[in-house]
């Protein structure tokens, strides 16, 4: 019997999904483990999707997506970041995760090394390994404000290093890169002849400061920026993301669309077009809810003297449970207190004593769940 692909067999399952599955069948769980907006998709977007079905948008689409949607994407980014993109600089994907997977596949050969953040979104590692490339982690430390250390990055570079991945606003930390940092990152990849994948899927969820895109400083076509409809418009189930890059890179990513998914569903693309070109007030309303939940969680954690990092964006909070094994801690918390959180260890080795909670949960869930979490930490003498 032939063996299955070891680069897939050797991958770990997401620790977040382990908690989700463990919680199945347990009644009354306070769910704060998954990063998903608590709101329904806005009605104008739903109606656009329904109308698209009635109008016959049930067929294959061009690999790179419908041109009106690609134009809406480039117009939106040009307006937000004062860019000069064309529709040909975009490719529509089946969610942001597929955009990242597509980019990694196009930019790396087997054995190439990809620098990824620790802590960072766990899917990065699985995506890299599934292409035959090699993940190499760089550590984000509280002492450096959880920003990349260029001194460390320089030490990690080898002749095989091909890509640097950054994420701002970040998951799980909620860190927003200052303009100076983003400029330095783009300069760094240019000096070291690397590609940059800039994961900017939480760009619209900013509590403090402003989001700065890597695209603003890309002078020689080495940046691939990743976006999604999921977070900003509560469209996780519609599965629409997009990548923005040079026409040459987009042409290769478009070619890979045929191999991976053929195309993003037509009805979802029409809904995404309506989202980008329609009213934008939902984004601000949702952000206010996440900010309120952030402040509620912070108030409770302060009351108990528990360390945490105050997020500037996205909708997560990184909490120091001061445990030896955050995976075991998260499972015990679920089984003993019915509170579901994400283990920090699933985001990388540096998260072994941390947990992540989602601020996109209902307000009552955050109030009750965080208090139960704080009481559990206190009972375990982990303060």
Image (cartoon, rainbow, N blue to C red):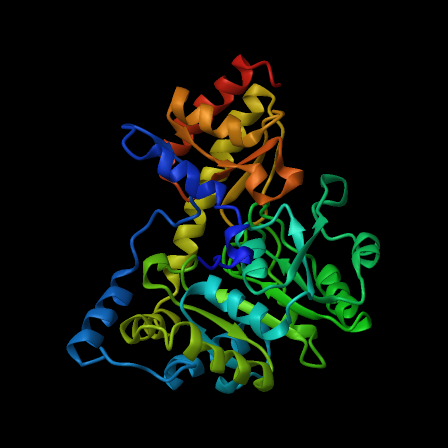
Image-based side of 285 in relation to 146, left or right: left
Residue 23, position as x, y percentages in the image: 35, 33
Q: In this image, 51 relative to 345: left or right?
A: left
Q: Quadrant of residue 213?
A: bottom right
The residue at the point 75 percent across, 61 percent down is: 180
Picture residue at 25% right of the left edge, 64% below the top:
46
| Residue 310 in view, yes or no | yes
Q: Which of the 4 image quadrants contains residue 274?
A: bottom left
Query: Whole-percent x and y of residue 26?
Result: 29, 28
Q: Identify the image quadrant of the C terminus.
A: top right
Q: Which sits in the foreground, 208 or 244?
A: 244
319, above or below 154, in the image: above
User: In terms of depth relative to the viewer, which is nearer, 197 or 259?
Assistant: 259
Closest to the observer: 329 or 382?
329
At which x and y percent is residue 299? 52, 28
Q: Residue at x 80, y 69 (%)?
A: 192
Q: Is residue 33 visible?
A: no
């Amino acid at each position: 019997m032939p063996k299955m692909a070891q680069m897939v067999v050797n991958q770990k399952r997401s620790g977040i999904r382990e908690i989700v599955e463990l919680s199945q069948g347990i009644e009354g769980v306070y769910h704060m483990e998954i990063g998903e907006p608590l709101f329904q998709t806005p009605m104008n977007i739903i109606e656009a999707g329904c109308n698209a079905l009635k109008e016959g948008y049930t067929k294959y689409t061009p690999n790179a997506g419908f041109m009106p949607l690609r134009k809406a994407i480039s117009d939106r980014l040009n307006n937000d970041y004062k860019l000069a993109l064309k529709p040909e600089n975009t490719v529509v994907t089946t969610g942001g995760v597929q955009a990242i997977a597509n980019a990694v596949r196009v930019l790396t050969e087997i054995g190439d090394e990809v620098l990824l953040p620790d802590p960072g979104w766990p899917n990065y590692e699985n995506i890299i390994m599934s292409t035959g490339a090699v993940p190499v982690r760089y550590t984000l430390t509280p002492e450096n404000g959880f920003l990349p250390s260029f001194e460390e990055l320089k030490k990690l570079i080898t002749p095989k290093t091909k890509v640097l991945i950054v994420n701002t606003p970040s998951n799980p930390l909620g860190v927003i890169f200052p303009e100076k940092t983003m400029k330095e990152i783009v300069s760094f990849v240019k000096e070291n002849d690397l590609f940059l994948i800039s994961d900017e899927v939480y760009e619209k969820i900013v509590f403090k400061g402003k989001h700065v895109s890597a695209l603003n400083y890309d002078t020689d076509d080495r940046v691939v920026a990743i976006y999604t409809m999921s977070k900003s418009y509560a469209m996780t189930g519609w599965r629409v993301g997009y990548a923005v890059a040079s026409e040459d890179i987009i042409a290769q990513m478009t070619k890979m669309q045929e191999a991976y998914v053929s195309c993003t569903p037509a009805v979802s693309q029409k809904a995404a077009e309506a989202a980008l070109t329609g009213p934008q007030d939902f984004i601000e309303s949702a952000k206010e809810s996440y900010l309120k939940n952030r402040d509620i969680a912070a108030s409770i954690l302060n009351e108990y003297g528990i360390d945490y990092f105050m997020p500037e964006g996205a909708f997560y909070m990184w909490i120091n449970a001061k445990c030896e094994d955050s995976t075991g801690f998260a499972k015990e918390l679920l089984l003993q207190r019915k509170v579901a959180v994400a283990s920090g260890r699933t985001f990388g080795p540096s998260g072994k004593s941390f947990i992540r909670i989602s601020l996109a949960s209902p307000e009552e869930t955050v109030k009750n769940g965080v208090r139960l979490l704080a009481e559990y930490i206190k009972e375990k003498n982990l303060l």
